[in-house]
Amino acid sequence: MAPSLRLAVALDYFSFEAAEVPEVPLMQGLSTSLVLIALLAVVAPLAARFLDRAVKVPIVVFEIVLGMVLGPSILGWIQPTEFVDTLAQFGLAMLFFVAGNEVDFAAIRGRPITRASAGWVISLAAGIGAGFVLGPTPAAAVIIGVALCSTALGALLPILRDASESKSPMGIAVTALGAAGEFGPLVAISLFFSGRELGPATAVLLGFVLLTGLAIYLASRARHSLLHAQVTRTLHTSGQFAVRSIMFILTVLVVLSMVLGLDMLLGAFAAGVLWKVAIARAPEQDRHVIEAKVDAIAFGFLVPVFFIDTGIDFDLSALTASPAALALVPLFLLLLLVIRGLPSMLAAPARSSWADKRAIILFGATGLPIIVAVTAIGRNEGLISSAISSALVGAGMLSVLLFPLLALRQLQREPSATAARHQDVP
């Protein structure tokens, strides 16, 4: 899963020696796939906009479904390639960077994050318990449990932003849920699937947390006058110091997490937090411009590749091979609601209506990126079958398709309460 560009791949792509002539069909196939993926990235928001008046469907759903339709599962026009998989891993890392960068820890500290974390611990215990029933081995049980206790913060943040709920008490509660539901599973993955014993893995994880925590603390104490000045000078020039700094911080922490045997997404999430702290005192106008540039790189390029590639890699045949495998999809979807959704009510804002609590359940049960990551680990290491992996990813896809839409409808059921939700909750 770790992104790596090997020298041999570069030589295959860019060498024009006679010996490379047999690789031309491969290059043509790659070129066709890249063009089609770029086309799907353009079609997805147009399709979402076309259906917006009838039903509001997140763009990521269209990206996944379109990738599935044009991928090997149905039409077979796009085939999985190492190059696209590498781009997809950068997209996944960028998704978690954005999540870390957008989490307002000052807003979610105290009651929201405490209760959200308590709910996540309950979800993890319940998920592993369900995993022991459904999985063939303890390792498979942990994979299933981690998948079922995740919340797709990276997918929910744009939805909350588009619905003007990101700064409301409901949005703050969902952000806290997402922070716990993404950071917690990353810690669990790093502990249980690092290849080390639990004791050494815990020590390595604590070391990484201390290093990044120290970096974040030092960044919060410094004024960064030189950084901000250089950012301002190059904001509209080819220097683009802010973007280059972001890519440097992201690369360093991702590589550090990989070197330590931790999941790369832990480094990506930490990089987003670190950058948010480093740029916090920059001029507000500059910060808005930088955020627009990050959104352009993430949601205009890399993140769509990840979701489209998820659809391309989806093993539909493993699900349709037997009725039992297909039945796992609605079962896992229900378990997401019960195991992850119900404990999420702990994070509901004070004096929430029942409609708000139902929305919290649905938002909390929305999960996909962590599910994709942890099931890929389990499948690659032979810990879970392709059927279980595809069923979990299928349930995650349905959760992204259905749950945010249903949650937003819950919030819209009480127009008189809309203003109240945007008031500061004491």
Image: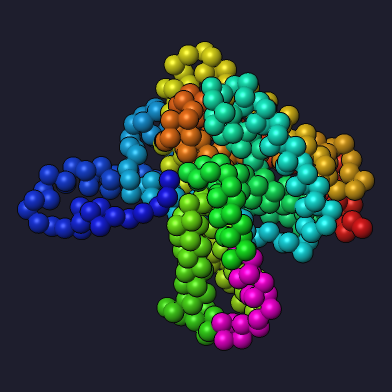
In this image, 290 relative to 420: left or right?
left
- The residue segment tinted magenta is 212-229
Magenta run includes residue 225: yes
In the figure, 281 relative to 28: above or below?
A: below
Magenta run includes residue 154: no
Residue 158 visible to an observer of this rendering:
yes
In which image quadrant can residue 415 be found? top right
Quarter of the rendering occupied by the N terminus: top left
In the figure, 289 relative to 269: above or below?
A: below
Residue at image position (61%, 82%) is 224
Q: Nearer the viewer, residue 406 or 254?
A: 254
Residue at image position (16%, 58%) is 15
- Residue 294: give x, y in percent of width and height: 54, 64
In the figure, 135 relative to 416: above or below?
A: above
Q: Residue furthest top?
A: 323
- Residue 130: give x, y in percent of width and height: 66, 25
In which image quadrant can residue 219 be found? bottom right
- Residue 36: give x, y in percent of width and height: 36, 44
